[in-house]
Amino acid sequence: MQNVVVLIELTHTGHVPASARGLLAVATRLGTPVAVTVSEIPLEASTVAALGELGAVTIHAAHGPSAHSILVAHLVDALDAAVTAHAPAAVLAASSVDGREAAGRLAVRTGAGVLVDVVDAHSIDGKITTTHSVFGGNYTVHAAVPGALPIITLRSGAIDEQAPAVTPEVLNIELAAPPGTVATIDSYSDAPENQARPELRGAATVVSGGRGLGSAENFVLVEQLADALGAAVGASRAAVDAGFISQTAQVGQTGVSVSPQLYVALGISGAIQHRAGMQTAKTIVAINQDEDAPIFEIADLGIVGDVFTVVPQAIELLNARR
Amino acid sequence: MKIVVLIKQVPDTAEERRLDPGTGRVDRQANDPVIDEITERALELALSVKDKDKSTEVAVLAMGPEETSKAIRKALSMGADSGIHILDPALAGADITLTAAALAAALKGAQADLIIAGNESTDGRAGIVPAMVAEHLGLPLLGALASAAIGAGTVSGERLNDAGTQRVSAPLPAMLTVTESFEEARFPNFKGIMGAKRKPVTTLSASGLGIATEPLSTVIDLEQRPPRTAGRKIIDEGDAAAQLVDFLVTQRLI
């Protein structure tokens, strides 16, 4: 079986990121996964076990004291070394900020091709083909890089699949100083983890709020409905720009793209830029006071009404069903 | 200091955007081309440096067909000093690899202390070209910044990623990319529009840059998703919440 190199971006606190599950699942489909990690100290047994649980057959574990104080360069060097050592048929990374940069630099350094923001990948007769969702899901495109090593960045949350568990073989490698001038990370400030609520990317249900909520205080209503439905919280750009919620919750053209089973839009007019981030949802429910709001053109159930009346009633009914 | 800003002309996101079913390329006839908003914010950052220090030279670099010259002229009217246009019909089907190589080749001759780009375009959304350009040039990259402090010999800022924020820094020459957290661009004024006509724009071809024109990636096929249609619309008369819950139950969503 051909090797597939997978970048697993361990956090500076040593956690396996949520993206690892889908990346290793796709890598298992395409071949034998070789996970590449970069950490300050050799991997803890718990990290090795966690990666084995997700299907990492081999772990190319690079470690060194500057692992978390040099920006991206170590990831590129570790990937480059893994490509040389394991002669993979493909390289996978998350479409995250660091993953994309590492993938891009690796492609230039090794003369490989890039296939980006991929939602699915298959190997047919040894040829790797990727699926892309373009222009807010209006188009599905299949692509390949026939003459070169494909470096693939996978959209977070696109793959809901887990590879069978394995017992990984760990190859410990010491990091060398990266060549040339590098950017440094001077300090970290981690986002508070909300364990109670699912992550927006890949969530089965998303409840989003828009300008119609009126204020940051009122936006709590969106969170309450989300909790009643076990959903992730999203927002329109208008709500983010108005300061109701942080930018990480932004769904749309320039935010997160989601494809949940259920998308509930509260007080969102449904501008084309918002629809580009959510119109591939299986079912869309919209509540808006303006009966001409464009969101109703794509909603499976549209409710013309006041969110401040309808949503509290719905929360009460949902909680009563428990 | 010399700053080069990468700008991109894209189809307006406020309209329906199309792909050409034959080539898999963006259908440029389908809508009005505009400067991508994120690259306007990148230009605004460069112009804000120039506001404080008049000796700053700001150039814009764009690759694209003939009409891209309009985007460059707009950038000049906003306050950039000069433009570089990579214009070559042989590059019409350029993929990410080729685009990054072309931009890097043009930048090699530009002697920039700082290169500023947007974190990702609204059409491709790849967000990978800046890192590839930085690798070609051997420069450090501060990507996806929420804020930036540009000094004489260094650049620093706050970088946004999935895990939170990081304070990052790099010595110049370097490259950075901005996110939507940066200021919106200024509007060109009358003086700017008149002055833009006299500002220099250099045109470069693929052969002039010494790069190949054969892309690595190919589009195998594409399919257009049928448009979504409206379902049931009800007006709340006191029972909408109950109808909503019933709907979710019938659809097995709860």
Image (cartoon, coloured by chain):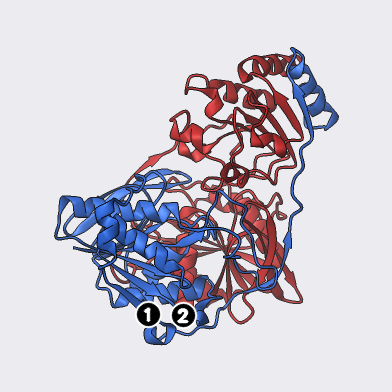
Chain colours: A red, B blue
Answer whether labels 1 and 2 touch (C-beta < 8 Å): yes
Residue type, label 1: Leu
* Residue B80 falls in image quadrant: bottom left
Query: Is residue B59 or residue A86 the one in the foreground?
Result: B59
Tag 2, which secondary structure? Answer: loop
Task: Name the image quarter holding the C terminus of chain A.
Answer: top right
Relative image position of residue A181 (x, y in whole percent):
28, 67
The residue where tag 2 is placed is B88
In the rendering, at what x and y percent does residue A59 appear? 56, 62
Quadrant of the rendering where the N terminus of chain A is positioned: bottom right
Residue B91, horizontal then vertical, whole percent: 50, 78
The amino acid type found where label 2 is placed reads Asp
Q: Tell me the residue at 62%/43% (across/down).
A: A275
Tag 1 subunit: B
Q: Is residue B246 left or right of residue A75?
A: right
Badge 1 and badge 2 both on one subunit: yes
Question: In this orientation, which residue lies closer to the viewer: A269 or B117?
Answer: A269
- Is B112 left, or right, of B40 in this rendering? left
**Residue located beneath label 1 in the image:** B204
Q: Dot 1, crowdedness within 10 Å: few (<14), some or many (≥20)?
A: some
Q: Is residue B76 left or right of residue B253?
A: left
SS of the residue at dot 1?
A: strand
Q: Position of residue A142 (x, y in %)?
A: 69, 67
